[in-house]
Amino acid sequence: VLFNQVNNVLNEVPDTKIELVFHGFAVYAMLKDTGYLKQMIISLHKKGVVFAVCNNSLKKRNIDPGRV
C-alpha cells in the first residue's frame, strides 16, 4: 500500500522529495541479500525516492549495516 501511495504522489507531483525510513522488522525488506521488496524499491529509487534504514533497528537485530 505504501508503495502505491508514493507512486500516486509522484505521478501527481513528480518533483516531490520523498524519503522512506525503514525501522523495526521492516529493515529486513532492505537487505541486499534477502530483501523481499527489492524490485519495488529499485523502481521508486529510479524515480528519486530516498531510502534509509534505522541504525538502531539494525543494531537491535545484530544486522551488519553492509547488508543494506
Image (tube, rainbow, N blue to C red):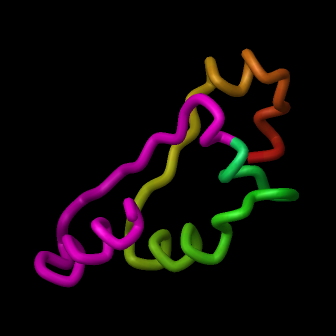
Residue found farthest to the left: 12
Q: Is residue 18 left or right of residue 25?
A: left
Q: Is residue 6 left or right of residue 58?
A: left
Coordinates of residue 49 in the picture (x, y in percent): 39, 63
Image vertical order of residue 53 relative to residue 19, above or below: above
Residue 37 falls in image quadrant = bottom right
Q: Residue at x 64, y 24 (%)?
A: 57
In the rendered image, residue 26 lying in the magenta stretch gets the answer yes
Image vertical order of residue 67 relative to residue 32, above or below: above
Q: How many marks?
A: 0
Q: Residue at x 18, y 72 (%)?
A: 15
Q: Residue at x 76, y 51 (%)?
A: 31
Q: Quadrant of the N terminus?
A: bottom left
Q: Residue at x 67, y 51 (%)?
A: 30
Q: Is residue 31 left or right of residue 14?
A: right
Coordinates of residue 7 in the picture (x, y in percent): 31, 75
Residue 36 falls in image quadrant = bottom right
Coordinates of residue 32 in the picture (x, y in percent): 79, 57
Coordinates of residue 35 in the picture (x, y in percent): 75, 58
Image vertical order of residue 24 relative to residue 37, above or below: above
Residue 33 falls in image quadrant = bottom right
Residue found farthest to the bottom: 11
Report the span colored magenta: 1-27
